[in-house]
């Protein structure tokens, strides 16, 4: 079992023991592009929608990111950007880094990232806190 799967089981177990629920959310690092298409600067191409990460919002409002939805390197690359929770229509294809893509995106509020499944908070460095 991977650390990510183990951590997800721990989140599920803690939620059950403490009788709380958490919400599946999409997190965007940076503002939603006005054209609703993210741009992949490395490959010099436009994505088919807005790039996001998947995560879970806990009852205290903090968000835990699922790193399986995009590479850890991409998360660290975007870590200095504004973090927002967004909603929209999930496309049936992913971005060039494997991340989910949304259309009809709207901002729901700021996201406070409390961790990334499979990584200790200290491993993440100060930039994602």
Image: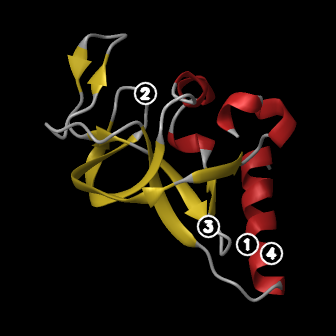
Q: Is residue 100 above or below residue 23?
A: above
Mark nearer the viewer, 3 or 1: 3
Camera-side residue of 90 and 115: 115
Q: Which mark is residue 12?
A: 1
C-alpha distance separating marks 4 and 3: 18 Å
Find residue 43 and report its horizontal and vertical position in percent.
31, 11
Verify CB contact (< 8 Å) between mark 3 and mark 2. no
Left/right of residue 24 with respect to residue 61 in the rendered view: left
Q: Quadrant of residue 20?
A: bottom right
Q: Which residue lies under the disc numbered 2?
A: 97
Q: Which residue lies under the disc numbered 3?
A: 61
* Quarter of the figure with the C terminus: top right
C-alpha distance separating marks 1 and 2: 27 Å
Left/right of residue 115 with respect to residue 69 in the rendered view: right
Q: Which residue lies under the disc numbered 4?
A: 13
Camera-side residue of 107 and 4: 107
Secondary structure of the residue carrying numbered label 3: loop
Residue positioned 51% across, 35% down in the render: 70
Find residue 38 and report its horizontal and vertical position in percent.
27, 31
Q: Is residue 53 above or below residue 106?
A: above
Label located before the other in sequence (2 or 4): 4
Residue positioned 43% across, 34% down in the render: 98
């Amino acid at each position: 079992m991977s650390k990510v799967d183990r951590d997800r089981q721990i989140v599920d177990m803690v939620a059950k023991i403490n009788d709380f629920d958490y919400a599946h959310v999409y997190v965007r690092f940076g503002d939603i592009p006005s054209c609703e298409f993210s741009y992949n600067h490395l490959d010099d191409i436009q994505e088919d929608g807005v790039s996001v990460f998947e995560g879970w919002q806990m009852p205290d409002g903090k968000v835990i990111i699922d790193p399986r939805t995009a590479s850890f390197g991409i998360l660290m690359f975007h870590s200095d950007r504004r973090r927002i929770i967004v909603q929209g229509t999930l496309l049936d294809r992913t971005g060039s880094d494997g991340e989910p893509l949304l259309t009809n995106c709207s901002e729901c509020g700021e996201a406070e990232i409390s961790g990334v499944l499979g990584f200790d908070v200290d491993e993440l460095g100060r930039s994602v806190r």
